[in-house]
Amino acid sequence: MTAVDAGRPLVVALLGTDHHPFDRLVDWMDTLAGSLEGRAHVVVQHGHSAEPRVAEGHAFVDHDDLERLVRTADVVVCHGGPGTIMDARRAGHVPVCVPRDPSLGEHVDGHQQRFAEVAGDAGMVQLATERDGVDAAVLDALAGTGPRVEQEADDAAGQAAARFAHHVDELVGHRQRRVRSVRRALLSRVQR
């Protein structure tokens, strides 16, 4: 795992564990890391996506290291996974959120886009759908001018978002189980 450099701000990007590649966000983080010219340490947890070429990359990070990274980060950039967003919020961040786009093969459906839009409207994330938006939000946060978590208001909002995230996860899981069940039924008919 990375050694946190106390002399430079830390930017952490979390792409989660979904098996769909999210190379677009990895590329954006590499471009950002290059433009920062060493003024910040950029770490990307890239999952099943391509490894970054400029930023420090880790496919997967164990839970304790992930919590430590998020707690010590100056800025968190993440995909639109409700659990990842809530982890960043609990650590005191208003994360820069780039939801996965199913039209680009980054996920199975648009639930991340819908969740991120609602979370953005509520001020829980800084929604960014273009590279320039990510760059601006990260630079604002590094300059200390980005939004901050207001703990009291965040507790109620976080609980509501966690309930919503749980329902989204249940629906997506139910849909995937149903699709597998239908596939098995069709395959058994074909094999007869």
Image (cartoon, rainbow, N blue to C red):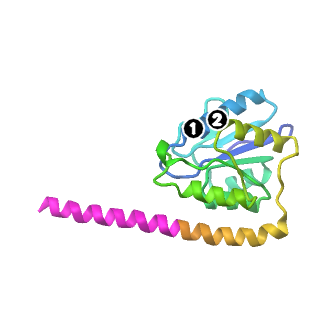
Q: Are marks 2 and 1 in contact (CB under 8 Å)?
A: yes
Residue drawn at point x = 86 percent, y = 37 percent: 7
Q: Quadrant of the C terminus?
A: bottom left
Residue drawn at point x = 57 percent, y = 44 percent: 59
Q: Is residue 126 shown to the viewer in this render?
A: yes
Residue 4: x percent and y percent? Answer: 78, 43
Q: Which mark is residue 28?
A: 2
Q: Is residue 128 above or below residue 181?
A: above
Magenta highlight on residue 171: yes
User: Nearest the camera: 52 or 110?
Assistant: 110
Q: Which mark is residue 24?
A: 1
Q: Is residue 54 above or below residue 75?
A: above
User: Nearest the camera: 83 or 55?
Assistant: 83
Residue drawn at point x = 42 percent, y = 65 percent: 175
Q: What stretch of residues is rendered in magenta?
A: 169-192
Magenta highlight on residue 184: yes
Residue 161: x percent and y percent? Answer: 67, 67
